[in-house]
Image: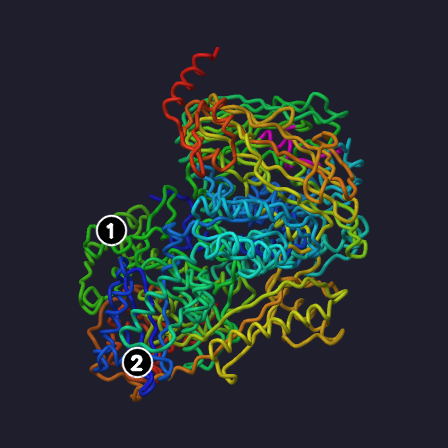
Amino acid sequence: MNTSPTQIEPYLMALLASRVGSISVQMNNIMIKSARSSVLALARDCSTAVLDADGQVLAFPAGFPVHVGGTSLAGEALLEMKGGRLRPGDAYLLNSPYHGNTHPADHTILVPVFHEDELLFICVCRGHQADIGNSVPTTYHTTARDVYEEGALIFPCVKVQEDYTDVEDIVNMCRMRIRVPEVWYGDYLAMIGAARIGERELQGIARKYGPDTIRAFCSAWHEYGRQRMVEEIRKFPAGTASYETTHDPVPGLVPGGVAVRVKLTVNPGEGWVECDFTDNEDSLPCGLNVSEATLTSAARTGVLNRMEAKDLPHCEGALSRIRIKMLEGSVVGRSRHPFSSSVATTNVNDRALVAVQCAFNQITGRLGMAEPKYDMGPAISVISGKDSRKGDRPYVTQIIGATGGFGGMNGRDGYAHYAISNGGMYVVNSVEMVENQYPIRYLKQEIASDRAGAGKFDGGPSAETILAPVTDPVTFVYLGDGRDNPAKGAAGGLNGAPAQAFRERVLDGVRTETIEELPMIHQVTLPPGEALKGLYSAAGGYGDPLERDPELVRHRVLEGWATAERARNVYGVVLDESPGGCSVNREATEELRAHLKKGRP
Amino acid sequence: MGIRVCIDIGGTFTDVAVVNDEDGGLNIFKNSTTPDEYARGVLAGLTDAAEFYGMEPAEFLRLCSSSRGGAINYGTTIATNALIQQKTARVGLICTEGHRDILTFREGGKDDPFDWDLDYPDPYVPRHLTVGVPERVGAGGEVVKPLDEDAVREAVLRFKALDVDVIAVSLLWSMVNPGHERRVGAIIEREWPGVKFNLSHLVNPIIGEYRRTIATVINASLLPIVGPYLHGFDERLKELGYEGDLSVVSCFGGILSLEDMVRRPIYSVDSGPTGAPVAGLLFARKELESSNAVTCDMGGTSFDVSRVTDGVISETPDAKVGFDCLGIRKVDTKSIGAGGGSIARVDSGGLLHVGPESAGAMPGPACYGRGGRRPTVTDANLVLGYLNPKAILGGRMDLNRGLAADAIQRDIAGPLGLDTREAAFSVWKTVCVNMTDAIRMITSWEGIDPVEYVFVSGGGAAGLHIIPMLKDLGVRRLIIPKAAGVLSAVGGLASDMVSEFQLNTETETSDFDYSGVNSTLEELKEKARLFLERNRVPPENRALEFTADARYLSQPWQITLPVSGSPYQGAADVENLMDSFHRVHEQLRGSREAGQHIAISTWRVKAVGRTPELIYRTAAPGGTEPEEEAKLDDREAYFKEIGGPTWTPVFHGDRLRPGNRVIGPAIVEEMATTLVVFPGTWIEVSALGGYVVHFSQACLER
């Protein structure tokens, strides 16, 4: 029996759920396809959501997990700050990490949706901007000691439209401060356009079914989500687990790195999971501090990644079964003004997400996971400079190349395309489109061999990328994690290879030689004739590599993801060469594996 | 007398649609599809058709020849099946050194960010059959590093030793400077004479290395399959008396000559549903004189929607096959898992879902009595009284209402706390909502107001749902044509000869490259002319439609924009181009930036050779009131908006005459379909024997 407390006919429930869900998808599509900056359009570093009148998420499409898991906080902030004063035709800009936003680079547009005089929904469109006016040309200011050094304009729910018209003063301020104002304004229009289309569609529903039905639906929908989530949590055994992982040091600022600790409790009886982050350090004088919204998303995503059901409703009713404890003023907690949260969506927050999903290994082997690759290496640098091919046009953008993959899992190899903050949703730039738009050339972008963490189930491989300025110097800003603390294997699996960056000299237009190794959190300007080479962090393996199916080892050697030496030394697999490939020498493999096992401590 | 034939091979049935010029009568001959040898099922249909017209097969086929004004258009699934079953030919790929993983990385973009219990899909060409050769062309077409010809020779010899079936070549920036690719082609011809190969700048000359490469390797992998198959079929027809040129239905909403299709077999991939919008346009024009049509097709497992705007079939560059893009543009068909066989279930939180899981033909819906226990959309329609338990498939199979009611009671009504009929209504309504959303995806999501369109509905199950769906969308014009069950085959009969040519010439409106663009347009016209001439299209039947891919500067997505094709003479022409971009951008994406310059990359022409208009027989008109012989026994059907169970008049569709009107609530039964005329609507039988649906003003108030 349906035990939902609010009476709404079952067919209407299915109908409204489908409509609201599809409106949030439609908003997302419009925003992506009309955006100017590649980070928003291609990286899909953006999200949309439909909130109810209490600011609680009803539906979000498959948006970036780091954005959407905590979107209710943005709705709550709007209602708290502007509650009684919201009017039809308003739109608000939020990017303050101290007011429920993720980090300042994500501009969030909130549009209250009215039926006659009654607030029924809030449309949310959030997108990572190409530039936000930081003191340096990147939206990720790792070394900012505080929000003042960071330099971005901070908007704590500021009205940007009234009566469906821009508040020009705000737009003019942004145009003065943001480096590529026409790109910013284009993305702003994309977000506003999407939110307004969402508004129009939601008003259509409200007219057709009436506000009473809408309200009844909202509470029934949260209740439905609660039931589904409780059911899913009941599939886990009860237990408590702890996990610690460490973000790499930031030279000069955080020499020891940033430890991230979580205590995970699963209570299937009552149907909740708790992620306790209270045992972490105080806020740090750098941009790595997470925000309430990102940490909430990280914890919820870590839990969702371990769940079997693929069709859970991602409404607040469901997500609130994942409880999060955090302290204010902690690097892994609620950010406190004026500490900077410039890099709140990746790096330390990524470590927090990994800590949650890997802590589950101590509770259940089901979907057991090694650590995934760590992010933000040279392949996804923010590049800036001038393009003399186009009349010295200035540009700032994040390029999105191939990176690395998910950790090996109990039962299958790690997926080869992943980013922790976005669940692998990002679209890889076309090399030709990037070369067309910016004075840069991809000399290489390929999977590098022998880097994936070996296991019974291998981690995802990682890419090698070489980027060369073509006609003008190019400034690269990147902040790669995973060199000093590479992705750990699990259940006997080996660690993934660490991330690395190099300055290269271009030899014959295409091939390069190394000049020097570069730090992994770094800003560098290279002239034509030099190149930036990045080896992405590779994911950890799951289970003993000596138990890996020798045929799978053979396949990876054939495809060049691993060498025959590695097959022998790490997996204990002996391969015989055959025309056009290789085959497994079963006997020699068994012998070698027995020998290698014996030699272990 | 010329006879036009379209052959449409489906999963279950092979339809042979035949129109003869003399009386315009359309006849359909259905035979079982013969997957072991498709030609057998086709020839059976042709033999049936010859018999129907009282001819020997040889005589019938002679009248189908183009010299007699006839045609045979062949819709084949051979390429689609080869892709699905992964039985394509072995391809060796030559690419730019340092970029061997273009087919592995694809475009990234995993859709479900929380699902990790899945394997990463293998690249279309494995890496051990992919060779990077030292060479590089830059973004401006400049040679950064000359081609290493020894490396190419080694690659070719390696492929020869490995016995690949065909070689594909896709180098970076080859669409701007094809010199290196051409050189690789020459080396292949010299080192391995006779091996088939494809060069990417010829197959799909667009910017974007993944899409250019994937289209090239897919095309290459089909070369050894589609060519022999089509030639074999053509020979069989010729042996039997056919004297003309066989045409093949393409996924581009038209037909291609056999030789063109053999060279570009990728254009036969997923060509099955692309006849539907052609048929939709045909009926929208003939019945309601409109060139804006949305075609909906609902069968047993899927609901397909396509759109025609101003007579132009909507296309998409984003079509997928398995985990890969097709890379080429094709007719845009939105397809969702909603059909008569879609299974309904209630989840653990009490929410009702319908589809995409389908009961298929076996066991089929519960009411088929073949052991299916799970309730389906067909079961709901039976319980609601919309379907007649006795009439389906011309009375060949009875439906068991008891079994349907049991399944709905057990799986839906019980868990939801509803009575069986209310539960059946909920299932019916939910599938309607899902299908309505699919229509929105191809209309309002693309800035199109469905109210301005004529809807054409086909497929066995659509008549049970379509009217209330369109009421929800505020649509006023709906046609259910007489040939609703075989829209694709009818579309294939009416299809034009269509091919597309494209060239890459990057320019920005701030510094417009007049001579470059104008010579590109000239070159496109020449390619189109050669194509139309080769296919002997008379000048009066030729049409050229030009488009360009454009974007705001720094915008990574492009939109496709109609352009005139005339040379750009000066600033005013460029202004027009910009205006038209701003307008289309606002319509599609909801925003415009007046005054901003745009960049254009790809220029393209669609060459159309128009097929003579299909003559369609009209029947003798009757009065407004259906004749007595058209009336069947009333039965109880469920209409929630007028209070539930209602005694409803039922009509025999084949006995309705043009001019007859049927006012809802009513049900019209035909051999393979049922149309439910809902309260507040009425239908009129048109001169062509189709139903034109009218919505009363009251029921349109949203």
Of residue B511 and residue A373, the one placed in the foreground of this image is B511
Q: Which residues are magenta?
A: A332-352
Instruction: Please provide percent x and percent y for residue A358.
Output: 51, 27
Q: Chain of mark 2?
A: B
The nearer-to-camera label among 1 and 2 is 2
Q: Can you say whether A347 is above or below B412 in the image? A: above
Q: Residues within 10 Å of mark 2 (few under 14, many from 20)?
A: many
Q: Which mark is residue B62?
A: 2
Q: Quadrant of the N terminus of chain B?
A: bottom left
Report the amino acid beneath label 2. Arg
Based on the displayed image, in which of its 4 quarters is residue A161 positioned? bottom right
Q: Chain of mark 1?
A: B
Report the amino acid beneath label 1. Ala
Of residue B508 and residue B386, the one placed in the foreground of this image is B508
Residue at image position (75%, 28%) is A285
Q: Can you say whether B187 is above or below B467 in the image? A: above
Q: Residues within 10 Å of mark 1 (few under 14, many from 20)?
A: many
Task: Name the dominant secondary structure of the magenta segment.
Answer: loop
Based on the displayed image, in which of its 4 quarters is residue B566 positioned? bottom right
Task: Tell whether B589 sits left or right of A227.
Answer: right
Report the residue marked by disc 1: B407
Instruction: Please provide percent x and percent y for residue A573.
Output: 44, 25
Of helix, strand and loop, which one carries label 1?
helix
Task: Tell whether B175 sits left or right of A180.
Answer: left
Task: Tell whether B384 sits left or right of A381.
Answer: left
Whether residue A336 is in magenta: the answer is yes
Q: Are marks 1 and 2 on the same chain?
A: yes
Residue A491 visible? The answer is yes
